[in-house]
Image (cartoon, helix red, strand yellow):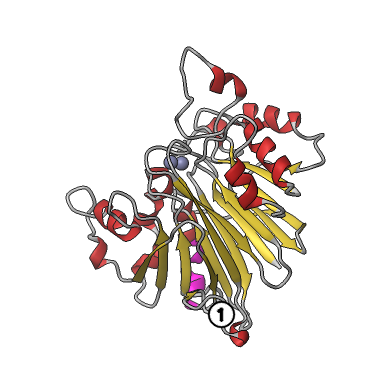
Amino acid sequence: MITLNFHGVRGSHPVPDGQMVGYGGNTSCVEVVKVNKAGVKVPLIIDAGTGLIKLGYAMGAKLFTNEYSSTFTMLFTHLHPDHTEGFNFFVPNFFPFCTIHILGMETLRKNVGGVLKGKMVPPTFPIEYKDLKSIRKHGVLNDGQQFYIGQDGAPISRYPPAKDADPLFEVQVMQAYAPSHPQQGALYYKIRDPEDNTTIACIWDVESHIGGDVRVITFAEQADLMIHDAQYTEEEYLSTKNPVQGFGHSTFSMAIENAVRAKTRYLIPFHYNPRHNDKLLDRISAQYRHIQSPIVLMSQEGLSLTLQNGLILQQEMLSIGFSN
Ligand SMILES: [Zn+2]
Ligand SMILES: [Zn+2]
């Protein structure tokens, strides 16, 4: 059994706006959670958009009571600000007993650690990266890489792992290059629950192609659930007035096309345009409600899905607030 929580679903920049609160204004942050053998929740976090800030507050006290594992892994798709901005305000970074394994791409000879470090330097930020209390371990991921996350929340260096390792997640990596996403591409992830093979494909910050993105389709083939970039409507994508082709993002129909061809059971449109308000997203959602294969479920900040054997068992809204 695996739980998938959406803490930020917006692309480009946050939108704290009344017309957007239904789907949410925070930028990309997805959390996959499993309970380990000791009964502790172990999160695997994908991207550190502003949605991560909320998650950090929610983890806060639970890290002291061991409800949440104080060792965990964070995967970065790439290093644009809508995927890193929340890191500076992530509460576990201020606890010395937290160990965070930070994994992502190396780009322009800078790895993910170097980029985060560069974002936390006075005078643009009052705390230096090196002064954070958490222990941070950095790693570089490459196209085609596969690895497991162990019971303790840390990546396992051996692949495949020892027989008695009983890992919580398997991660597979695909790297896309420009022009899929300018300028240095992005990493896409496939996360599998080894217990029942439930597989989630994380495909965002991608601009698909006519007829679908063959590499993405092959990578995500037979995944149970695909989370896919859906930044533009068809009209926006084809607009000559305000051209967005080449910006590295997909339309809703590109997302559907890739999910249909990859034969995923569910498609979750994600990385919404900050200009798309609740009304518009509701309209788009209604348009795809009749599709059975894949079932289209709109991402929403606070949406929590529990999956078993590739099927959504439970769907609920989390109430993570900033107050205690
Ligand atoms: Zn983005
Ligand atoms: Zn990007």
Q: Is residue 2 above or below residue 69?
A: above
Frontmost residue, 72 versus 189: 189
Based on the picture, tell me whether residue 62 belongs to the magenta stretch.
yes
Quadrant for the N terminus in the image: bottom right
Frontmost residue, 242 versus 278: 242
Residue 26 at x, y percent in the picture: 49, 44
> With 299 as the anchor, is 13 left or right in this view?
left
Q: Which residue is mark 1?
A: 161
Residue 255: quarter of image: top right
Frontmost residue, 189 versus 286: 189
Give me the residue at 46% from left, 51% from top. Answer: 77
Frontmost residue, 133 versus 141: 141
Q: Is residue 287 above or below residue 29?
A: above
Q: Is residue 208 above or below residue 48?
A: above
Give me the residue at 69% from left, 27% from top. Answer: 283
- What is the secondary structure assignment of the residue under circle 1? loop
Q: In the rendered structure, which segment of residues is drawn in magenta?
A: 57-64
Helix, strand or loop for the magenta stretch, by majority: helix
Residue 164: quarter of image: bottom right
| Residue type beneath disc 1 | Pro
Residue 250 at x, y percent in the picture: 56, 33
> With 87 as the anchor, is 70 left or right in this view?
right
Residue 308: quarter of image: bottom right
Based on the picture, tell me whether residue 38 belongs to the magenta stretch.
no
Name the residue furthest left. 123
